[in-house]
Amino acid sequence: MSRAPLVLGVESSCDETGFGLVSEGVLLGQGLASSAAQHAEFGGVVPEIAARAHLAAAVPTLRIALADAGVELADVTHVAATSGPGLATAVHVGLAAAKSLAWALDVPLYGVHHLAGHAAADTLEHGPLPAQSIILIVSGGHTSILHVGDLVRDPIEHLGDTLDDAAGEAFDKVSRLLGLGYPGGPAISRAATGGDPAAFAFPRAMLRPGDAPYTFSFSGLKTAVARTVEKIERAGEQVPVADIAASFEQAVVDVLVTKALRAVEDRGLSTLVIVGGVAANARLRAVAAERCAARGIELRVPPPRLCTDNGAMIAAVGDLLVRSGAEPSGLGIAADPSAVLHGAQLPLLR
């Protein structure tokens, strides 16, 4: 009798080193290390620091994942790794580790698109995705609305992306303006807790009639916050950090939820899935839940531990690929730091 596949997922696209183990849709264990603290003094991720941190963290984090799952490395039947997009040096480290493991274990290797991993993360909490859904991906480097059928068998349709800063980047930059530190998402969220989201009327970009319905732009919002802070400081007044943080956060959330729900209704669907690092934001989760409930739309959001970059989400994609009968990518798969999302599995570069 053949044993159930046990997929090891490897993630290293930015500043988190992640290993996860998934079998037949069930997360068995994971290990995660972050180099965020090393980047804080620079106000953002430094690629070379991230790559060196991945090198240092890979083996200890793998051991944590195996212990958490209660399995041995020899039990792994398949390996999946982020092969793009991401920081070039960072992606290379994780992919090289995955290739080494697949070669040493003599098991198949799958190259996975990082954003498909975020989408798959929700399946580890709520089970298989519906036949059709709208997925809003909101992270440090990406803000996209996708129309998704079968995640690993069907082409993924991009309905809209951001023209400039991703939502997560906007959080980082506004956090720096307000002196709240890096990473900006959690810092803004904490500061906003005691603030008034209606204190400042910051712009809701791309929501006017005639604007692209699913396209985002956050650079104008970031500039509006900067000008507001500058004006207050020029007047010699104390900057109301909590109110500005809450008003900024609300402006981002309003645009994200409005456009995502528009996509759900325009496509005649009934499910919205929100994933990515910013999906951990409490305000986004609350507003989305309220507005989805009012429209009779099912909302699926993974728990915060599965929102940020992690190996479990990559293992989840690998597990789906294995169970769908997809051909492995093989050891010849190359890193593709600028990979566009057309499907969950990245093709070999020719």
Image (spheres, helix red, strand yellow):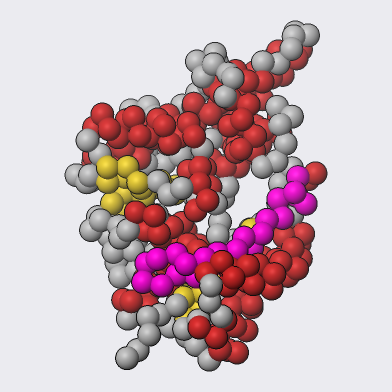
Q: Position of residue 93 (x, y in %)?
A: 67, 72
Q: Residue furthest left?
A: 268
The stretch drawn in magenta includes residue 122: no
The stretch drawn in magenta includes residue 28: yes
Quarter of the image that includes the N terminus: bottom left
Residue 91, placed above or below residue 244? below
Q: Position of residue 258 (x, y in %)?
A: 36, 33
Q: Position of residue 288 (x, y in %)?
A: 37, 34
User: What residue appears at the point 75 percent right and 45 percent down from the top-left corner?
Assistant: 40
Residue range corresponding to the magenta coloring: 17-40
In depth, the one of 242 and 265 nearer the eye is: 242
User: What residue appears at the point 31 percent right and 49 percent down from the top-left corner?
Assistant: 134
User: What residue appears at the point 41 percent right and 32 percent down from the top-left corner?
Assistant: 286
Name the quadrant containing residue 42. Answer: top right
Name the quadrant containing residue 149. Answer: bottom left
User: What residue appears at the point 32 percent right and 81 percent down from the top-left corner?
Assistant: 325
Residue 104, placed above or below residue 167? below
In depth, the one of 25 and 241 nearer the eye is: 25
Q: Position of residue 350 (x, y in %)?
A: 50, 82
Q: Is residue 106 visible?
A: yes
Q: Is residue 345 visible?
A: no
Q: Look at the magenta stretch and give its main secondary structure.
A: strand
Q: Residue furthest front?
A: 70
Q: Would residue 59 appear left or right of 202 to someone viewing this image?
A: right
Residue 220, placed above or below residue 36? above
